[in-house]
């Protein structure tokens, strides 16, 4: 029996469409990386204005951590049919609305929208031409005190680093109560008998996704560098310490912060804190999971990385002291004004505080942090805040790694006072100021920049790119940056005229370190 002509015609049309689609896919693949096959599906990227960098934004690396997956380890991303057009950032994790404060203008903050619990996305910038290019990979982990932040911050743009031959990846992770709540019931239901470090587990899941997929974007899965600033820097330090991250990266960059002089909260203590929260609000775990994420985020508490016995099986300081961390080359450092102190201080108040805290050693302390006038006390207040909060932990990392001599560590001190209007001049080389220099994203910075700033950004981003490529920041035209040795304290000092020299404030850091040890 013959088929009606109308059916034959429809079959022919469908066949043509199928062949046409197949031809389109083949053509896209022949064009290079315009279309990339990931484990979950096909993604297409967007070329920049000059056509030399492709960006892929908002690729899910894990399933949405919502419903029953709230406060659980991240699960594999769901597959999709067809082609995902990766042309915009995924949602930032649940947090308060971004509002400029102090020196932090909008280019330092997440976009106002979207902000959502469905946030486990990453972004990729690549200038590779084929997947055989094997470019080094730099993974950026944002700061925000583990309570805010996101990969869509303008100064985290990866185009300029991609132009230097590095595949740049920025990742989202859960923050605040949704990223770091510990609770006895959560621990009991966990196959790993732990709770709390969900944000770190997100970062590890992202690194596993990169390991599995980055070759399709022209990257080398065996040459991955993790990098971050502030809470992102502390995350880098935790990942270097964690046995769960073994083999997922080959190098690490830690800008302003680590946990090496911190006593992290233990799992039991964090569980008790979580139980107090649920008891005080008369909430069961089931009810907490059913609440809107925005309502959960408003519950009062401080949530951060803990020593959970799983992601971090022991104190980080102990892991490093015994040489059990992931052995990788490191860049670490801090900024001259890495402080949240106001700089307003009466000399009498500063001296009294020094005597209360340091007792018989107060006179020695005041040699390094003098307070002979109110103005000098204000300067010393900024310096001690910087040293205790950010510098000392990096200084300790330098001492440990240089003494173990298994991999080099390179220390820097960023002292460029970012050009500013009168209202912002007082912030100087503030916390986060170095980020648009190391990522070469000054074009997003709303400041009266000078030619020297663009030269410094080219210098620093070249060091960072070289380190991502080889584990050594040095290159042909760059001033030599020697590996750090604790005995001489020589670091790279970044400023209008960058140079190698003795670490500023080294004697004060030695005093503080001796008190801790």
Image (tube, rainbow, N blue to C red):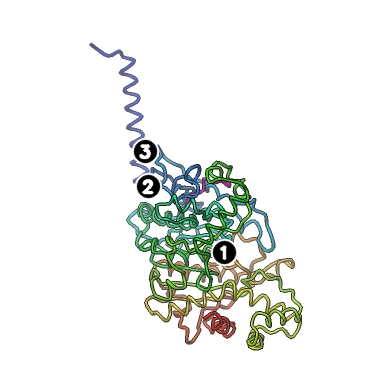
Q: Tell me: residue 226, above or below residue 191.
A: below
In the picture of the structure, the residue carrying the numbered disc 1 is 436
Of the residues under marks 3 and 1, which one precedes in the sequence? 3
Q: CA distance from mark 3 to mark 2?
A: 18 Å
Prevailing SS of the magenta stretch: loop
- Is residue 118 rendered magenta in the image? yes
Q: Tell me: residue 358, above or below residue 446.
A: below
Q: Nearer the viewer, residue 313 or 119?
A: 313
Is residue 300 rendered to the left or right of residue 321? right
Question: Of helix, strand and loop, which one carries label 1?
Answer: helix
Q: Which residues are drawn in magenta?
A: 114-122
> Which quadrant holds residue 18?
top left
**Image x and y of residue 407, in percent:** 39, 75
**Image x and y of residue 84, in percent:** 44, 41
> Which quadrant holds residue 338?
bottom right
In the picture of the structure, the residue carrying the numbered disc 2 is 38
């Amino acid at each position: 029996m013959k088929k009606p002509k109308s059916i034959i015609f429809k079959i022919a049309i469908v066949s043509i469409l199928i062949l046409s689609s197949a031809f389109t896919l083949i053509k896209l693949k022949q064009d290079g990386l315009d279309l990339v096959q990931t484990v979950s599906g096909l993604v297409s990227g967007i070329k920049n204005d000059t056509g030399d960098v492709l960006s892929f934004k908002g690729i899910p690396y894990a399933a949405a951590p919502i419903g029953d997956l709230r406060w659980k380890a991240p699960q594999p991303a769901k597959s999709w049919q067809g082609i995902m057009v990766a042309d915009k950032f995924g949602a930032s994790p649940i947090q308060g609305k971004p509002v400029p404060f102090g020196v932090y203008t909008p280019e330092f903050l997440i976009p106002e929208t979207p902000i959502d619990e469905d946030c486990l996305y990453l972004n990729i910038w690549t200038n590779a031409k084929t997947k055989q290019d094997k470019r080094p990979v730099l993974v950026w982990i944002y700061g925000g005190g583990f309570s805010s932040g996101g990969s869509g911050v303008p100064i985290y743009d990866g185009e300029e680093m991609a132009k230097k031959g590095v595949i740049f990846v920025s990742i989202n992770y859960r923050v605040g109560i949704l990223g770091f709540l510990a609770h006895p019931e959560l621990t009991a239901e966990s196959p790993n008998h732990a709770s709390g470090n969900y944000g770190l587990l997100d970062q590890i899941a992202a690194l596993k996704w990169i390991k599995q997929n980055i070759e399709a974007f022209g990257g080398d899965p065996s040459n991955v560098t993790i990098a971050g600033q502030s809470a992102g820097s502390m995350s880098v330090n935790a990942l270097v310490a964690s046995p769960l991250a073994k083999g997922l990266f080959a190098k690490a960059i830690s800008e302003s912060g680590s946990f090496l002089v911190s006593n992290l909260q233990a799992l039991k203590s964090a569980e008790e804190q979580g139980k107090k929260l649920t008891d005080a609000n008369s909430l069961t775990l089931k009810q907490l999971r059913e609440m809107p994420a925005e309502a959960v985020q408003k519950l009062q508490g401080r949530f951060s990385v803990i020593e959970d016995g799983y992601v971090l099986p022991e104190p980080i300081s102990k892991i490093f002291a015994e040489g059990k961390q992931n052995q990788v080359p490191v860049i670490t450092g801090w900024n001259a004004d890495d402080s949240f102190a106001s700089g307003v201080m009466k000399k009498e108040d500063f001296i009294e505080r020094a005597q209360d805290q340091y007792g018989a050693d107060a006179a020695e302390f005041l040699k390094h942090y003098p307070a002979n006038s109110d103005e000098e006390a204000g300067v010393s207040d900024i310096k001690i805040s910087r040293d205790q909060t950010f510098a000392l932990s990096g200084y300790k990392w330098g001492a440990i790694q240089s003494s173990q001599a298994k991999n080099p560590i390179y220390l820097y001190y960023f002292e460029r006072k970012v050009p500013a209007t009168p209202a912002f001049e007082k912030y100087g080389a503030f916390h986060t100021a170095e980020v648009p220099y190391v990522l070469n994203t000054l074009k997003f910075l709303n400041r009266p920049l000078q030619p020297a700033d663009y030269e410094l950004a080219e210098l620093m981003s070249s060091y960072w790119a070289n380190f991502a490529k080889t584990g050594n920041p040095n290159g042909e035209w760059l001033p030599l940056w020697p590996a750090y040795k604790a005995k001489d304290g020589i670091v790279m000092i970044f400023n209008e005229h960058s140079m190698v020299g003795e670490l500023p404030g080294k004697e004060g850091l030695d005093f503080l370190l001796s008190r801790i040890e």
